[in-house]
Image (cartoon, rainbow, N blue to C red):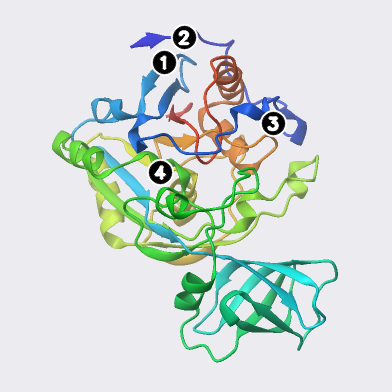
């Protein structure tokens, strides 16, 4: 274990503007491919109380948890949500599914030189035809024609929706590695990337340690990559995501609390679902939509520790981790990560954050 120093006392005073969450990132630090092994990533451990940083490896994780701690994982499964094609007029289009509504309808972003019109048709890969039913805000509602299972159609005709900062075309390796080993419920168009560092052996080691592994589902939408444009963060409209929290996970969290153990969220999506489900003060099982926007000053109710990747500048996810571990602490950690050449974003390295105000 190596302690890497600490910043000045953490503070959230004045951290209310978009520019407070910016940083310089050399482009070469954006990971374009995953590590050779899932657990081979680096793990930067930040204590939100003291501000101390420790350099670790992700495979060290079992030694950092105690028997009775509960790790909550998002078991959403990434669908092949990107489909290429053309309009009836011949113009090229790219469709990025945001959400499957039912067996034949989806909400999607449609990129084209001119926006498609209602009642128009799109000819997509593998002979898939889609009718444009209309617009819902920034998305289009599409109906796949002659379709009785939209998820199966997307899996057959689509490609892995890699994030916009990954420049290579998705291949078979991405189809495996841009998916957690515990993915179960199809519906996400972006991976819960903190979970990409886990393999079956590491999960077994955590169980052997006495940790409790629990799950929830939050279908990550393309909105996770949307930039924040409002300098006044109070004006930002958060994207909506659907989550489902089972009673078994609520009970696991309650048991950890009763035993004085920690609740560890695997990824910001798990944290967001848990905190949304505890908005009334009590963690409740069920399914709902959430637009929860977590920024400095947020009173965390459930999560004690967070495992997460490094996030985009000026993003809501960077605001979330800053709220969790302290603005100054996170700024210091990101500066250190850049200096030490950590790998950033979806295929990059990870952080273990201790909550600033336990």
Of 288 and 161, the residue lying toward us: 161
Q: Determine the CA span between mark 4 and mark 2.
A: 26 Å
Task: Tell me the number on the disc at residue 118.
Answer: none
The nearer-to-camera label among 1 and 4 is 4
Query: Reading the chain from its start, which is encountered first: label 2 or label 1?
Result: 2
From what the image shows, is residue 343 above or below residue 175?
Answer: above
Image quarter of the N terminus = top left
From what the image shows, is residue 135 above or below residue 148?
Answer: above
Mark 2 burial class by Cα count in 10 Å: few <14, some 14-19, many 20+: some
Residue located 65% across and 48% down the image: 164
Q: Determine the CA span between mark 3 and mark 2.
A: 22 Å
Of 65 and 94, the residue lying toward us: 94
Circle 1: element type? strand
Q: Position of residue 146 (x, y in %)?
A: 55, 92
Q: Determine the CA span between mark 1 and mark 4.
A: 21 Å
Q: Determine the CA span between mark 3 and mark 1.
A: 23 Å
Q: Determine the CA span between mark 2 and mark 1.
A: 6 Å
Q: Where is mark 4, residue-wise?
A: 196
């Amino acid at each position: 274990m190596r302690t890497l120093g600490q910043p000045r006392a953490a503070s959230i005073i004045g951290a209310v503007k978009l520019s407070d969450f910016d940083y310089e990132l050399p482009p070469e630090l954006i990971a374009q491919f995953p590590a050779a092994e899932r657990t081979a990533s680096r793990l930067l451990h930040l204590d939100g109380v003291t501000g101390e940083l420790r350099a670790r490896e992700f495979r060290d994780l079992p030694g950092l948890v105690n028997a009775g701690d509960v790790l909550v994982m998002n078991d959403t499964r990434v669908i092949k949500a990107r489909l290429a094609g053309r309009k009836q007029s011949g113009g090229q289009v790219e469709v990025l599914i945001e959400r499957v509504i039912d067996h034949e309808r989806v909400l999607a972003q449609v990129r084209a030189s001119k926006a498609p019109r209602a009642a128009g048709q799109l000819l997509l890969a593998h002979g898939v035809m889609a009718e444009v039913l209309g617009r819902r805000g920034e998305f289009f509602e599409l109906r796949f024609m002659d379709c009785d299972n939209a998820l199966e159609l997307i899996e057959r005709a689509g490609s892995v929706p890699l994030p916009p900062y990954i420049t290579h075309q998705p291949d078979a390796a991405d189809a495996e590695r841009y998916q957690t080993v515990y993915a179960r419920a199809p519906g996400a168009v972006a991976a819960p990337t903190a979970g990409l560092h886990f393999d079956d052996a590491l999960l077994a080691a955590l169980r052997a340690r006495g940790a409790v592994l629990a799950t929830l589902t939050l279908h990550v939408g393309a909105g996770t990559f949307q930039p924040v444009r409002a300098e006044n963060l109070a004006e930002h409209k958060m994207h909506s995501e659907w989550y489902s929290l089972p009673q078994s996970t609520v009970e696991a969290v309650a048991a950890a609390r009763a035993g004085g153990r920690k609740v560890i969220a695997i990824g910001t999506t798990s944290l967001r679902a848990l905190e949304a489900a505890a908005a009334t003060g009590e963690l409740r099982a069920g399914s709902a939509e959430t637009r929860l926007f977590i920024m400095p000053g947020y009173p965390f109710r459930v999560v004690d520790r967070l495992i997460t990747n490094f996030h985009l500048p000026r993003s809501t996810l960077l605001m979330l981790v800053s709220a969790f571990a302290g603005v100054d602490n996170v700024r210091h950690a990101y500066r250190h990560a850049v200096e030490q050449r950590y790998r950033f974003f979806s295929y990059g390295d990870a952080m273990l954050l201790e909550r600033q105000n336990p």
